Structures are given as structure tokens and as C-alpha cells.
Amino acid sequence: MKPLTKVLIANRGEIALRVHRACQEMGIKTVAVHSTADASAMHVRLADESVCIGPPPARESYLNMAAILSAAHITGAEAIHPGYGFLSENADFAEMVEAHGLAFIGPKPEHIRTMGDKIAAKDTMRRLGVPLVPGSAGALASVEEAFAVAKEIGYPVLIKAAAGGGGRGMKVARAEEQLEEAYRTARGEAKAAFGNDEVYLEKYLDRPRHIEMQVLSDAHGNVVHFGERDCSLQRRHQKLVEEAGSPALTAAERDALGERVTAALRGMGYRNAGTLEFLWQDGQFCFIEMNTRLQVEHPVTEMVCGVDLVREQIRVAAGETLGYDQSAITFSGHAIECRITAEDPDTFAPSPGKVTTFHAPGGLGVRVDSALYSGYSVPPHYDSLVAKLVVHGATREQAIARMRRCLSEMVVDGIKTTIPLHQRIMADPEFAKGDYTIHWLERFVAKS
Ligand code: MV4
């Protein structure tokens, strides 16, 4: 086992900075890659070296596997961290990285591939004793099978695409007379969107929370969890606010779910960081999908656990053992993240352009992950996330108060951002009660 000395970061924006910071603290040199649109981006400025990998469209730069592998070779990087999005859940890329003798700072390619197929992911978790949403045993072979399964579990039901995920390719059937059309449209859309028309059926849960569990494994069979995040506050499958822990869960419920999840990952021989997504309704957890990457919202977990998840990812990718067990992981206080995007806070229309003034809030229990600086131009080619404002407090109430204070202190002039929307959410008495489902934010946005 050799410690890493140079890592290539195959991403941009705040997550490229996040990975760079962990590397720098570990004494590891960094290589940034960038498109021509990002030549003066913060992730390029801070890295030890940088390589331009193509023109602005992501397909020709941040998704260009050959260019990224060449950049790793030219600079002598020993490992690649993919961040989130882009190539982070591309099993072929992970395989190519390893075939070139480099370490992929993420899961094994086979596990990325399995979890990318939502049917295979559910089969795996079923086998390993993780609770699932009731539904078809694997892919539906025919519309007749859909009718039979739906009759058995009861309506409403949901048809989902095996290659979907993140909300793409889902159709609800509220009663028997809607099922045939849901089945046919779901298959047609799945074929068009993913080139794979395999679909499966689940009982539709009408008012769940979205709760996910953070896990980490080394290459020696040690697996731990870092508790849950509540990601119910989303609009059109874009998360806006995340919390750790979930306002709906007791410590005993967290421990129980954590034990089942870590046992399952031990059974799989999983490696590196991962997140299991559950729908939670009426006190029941139902597994829906697994994400085989570091997630945008990982900082809320870091705040309550006092752990650097990227450092841990790098250590286990280099072959180190975790060096601690579950009993070493403790949960303290409450953390909230607001995702601040360059969008109109009322219409959500993208608002790229020049940031004339950027001022980040600070103080006790405050973390701002952002690649912004005064004078920076937010390019129109990529994701609109410009800052993650993360706060920690001894209690949820104190975290909310701190977030309100930070939102009023933060300045992003020159472009529109969702800061005013976050201010309205943090001032809302219903949000303060913590009693929300995945549908709460859509209604809040519609009425405000
Ligand atoms: C569901 C569901 C209700 N019942 N599955 C959407 C994204 C994808 N990850 C799974 N999704 C859902 N699956 C059953 N059986 C409702 C959703 C859903 C959702 C889930 C998590 C967060 C936000 C959501 C918004 C709309 C629908």
C-alpha cells in the first residue's frame, strides 16, 4: 500500500474545490481539469497544476474520458476523484481508470453498474435483507403481469424505468383503468430516454419523506454508516434544503437502519462512499435506489459527525483501513444545508452572468462551499449551483436561527439567486415544525 502523492480532480465548481482542500490537507498534490469556459475558475487557480480538456459543452470536456485520462498521464496523477455528476457514476469510466493503472476514488465498477440498474439494485438489497417498497419481483414481462401485481398490492401504483432514477421515467396509475396507459407510456419514454424499455412496478407512496443513509467501506471489509440526511425539500427532483439528522427520526431508528445497511454493504463487498435512498412513510423505511458517489449534501453529515468524508474516501482508495468502528461515530447537534443556485427565486429561470460582489457569511458553526469570487462570471453551460451554505447548531431550532442570520449576511450581487426563497423557507412556521414530506416544497413555492 502506497500513499497517494497526486490526484486528478475530474470536476469543476465547489466540489472540485472541496476535493482539492482535502488533498491539500493530506499533503497530496492536485491536478485540475477544465473547459475553455472555466480557464479562470477558482478550482483551476487553487490546484497545483491544471490541464485544459476541451470546449465549454460538458460532453466535450468534463465528460471526455480520453482527454481526462490523457491529462492524468501527462501530469503523473495516481488517482482520479470524480466528484458528483459528470463521470462519477459511469462504470465504464471507473473501469478505464483502473485499466490505466490509476486508482478510482469511488466504488468498484461492478457496483456502480449494478446500482445504475434500478431493478438490479433492488434485487441486491432484497437479497441482503434491506426493506423495499412492495412491488414486482424484477422487470415486468407484460402488461398482464403489471395488472396481476397491482391487483395484489393495491392501487395506486408506480411504473418506473430500470435505467431511470432521480425521478426520470415514472408514471402513476391511481386505479386499474390507468395502468395500461402508464405501462405503455413508461416503456416508450424509457426506450426513448435510455435505450432500455425495462420497467418495474411499485406501490405508490403518497406522502413519504426522502431519507438517505451515508455509508463508507474500506477494501478490507470494514463498513460504517454516518447516519441519515433528510432530503425531502425538493422541487422537480432538485433538492433545495437538506438536514442531518432527519426531524422525523429517533436515534434508535437511525441505529436500527444503520445496522441493516452496513450489514448489506458488508455482504456485497462494497468499497468507498455510498448513499442508500429510502422513502419513509408511517414509520417504515423502503429502499428505492443507491447512489455510488459522494453527494452534494455530504457536508451536513460532516457537520454532525465531525468527519471529513473526502479524506476518508481518499484514504480507503489508497488501501488504508478505516481504523475505527461504528462506536467511534457519534452524532452531535443538527446541520442544515441551503443550496444556493444562480436562478430566479420565483420562476427558477437560470441567471448566469457576472458576480459583481460576493461576500460569504461566517462565524461559529458556519461553512460555505462555493467557487464564487467577486468578478467571477457564472457560465451558462453547467449546473446552476453556486454555493452551499451549511450551518451547525446544538439543536434544530438553533441551526435554523443560524441559517437565517447567515442568509441575511450573504451577498451575491450581479446575478439572481435563490437566497430570497431560502429566507422564506427558513422563516416558515411549518418548516420550523419539521413536519414535511417530499410534496411540501412544491406547494410552498406555488402559494408564495
Ligand atoms: C417513489 C415515490 C412514491 N412511491 N416510489 C422520485 C425520484 C426517484 N429517486 C424515486 N422517486 C419517487 N419514488 C414510490 N414507490 C415518489 C418519488 C418521488 C420523490 C422521491 C424522493 C424525493 C422527491 C420525490 C419527488 C417526487 C416523487
Image: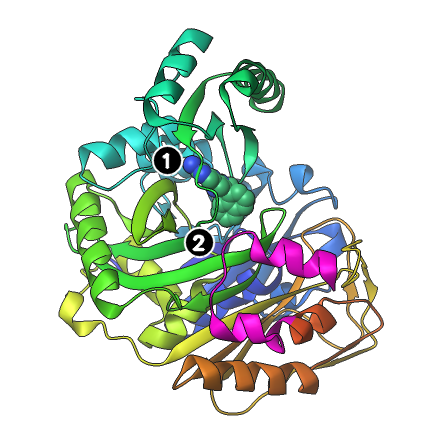
Asked if 126 appears above or below 359 in the picture, the reply is above
Q: Nearer the viewer, residue 272 or 289?
A: 289
Is residue 336 visible in this depiction of the protein? yes
Q: Residue at x 63, y 19 (%)?
A: 192
From the top left corner, tell me how far across and down residue 116 is, in percent: 42, 33
Q: Main secondary structure of the magenta part?
A: helix
Asked if 59 appears above or below 306 in the picture, the reply is above
Q: CA distance from mark 2 to mark 1?
A: 21 Å
Task: Residue under label 2, please give it.
Answer: 209
Which residues are the magenta region? 425-448
| Circle 2: element type | strand
Q: Nearer the viewer, residue 241 or 440?
A: 440
Q: Residue furthest bottom?
A: 363
From the top left corner, tell me how far across and down residue 100 is, in percent: 40, 37
- The verdict on label 1 being within 8 Å of ligand 1 is no
Count of numbered circles in the view: 2
The residue type indicated by label 1 comes to Met
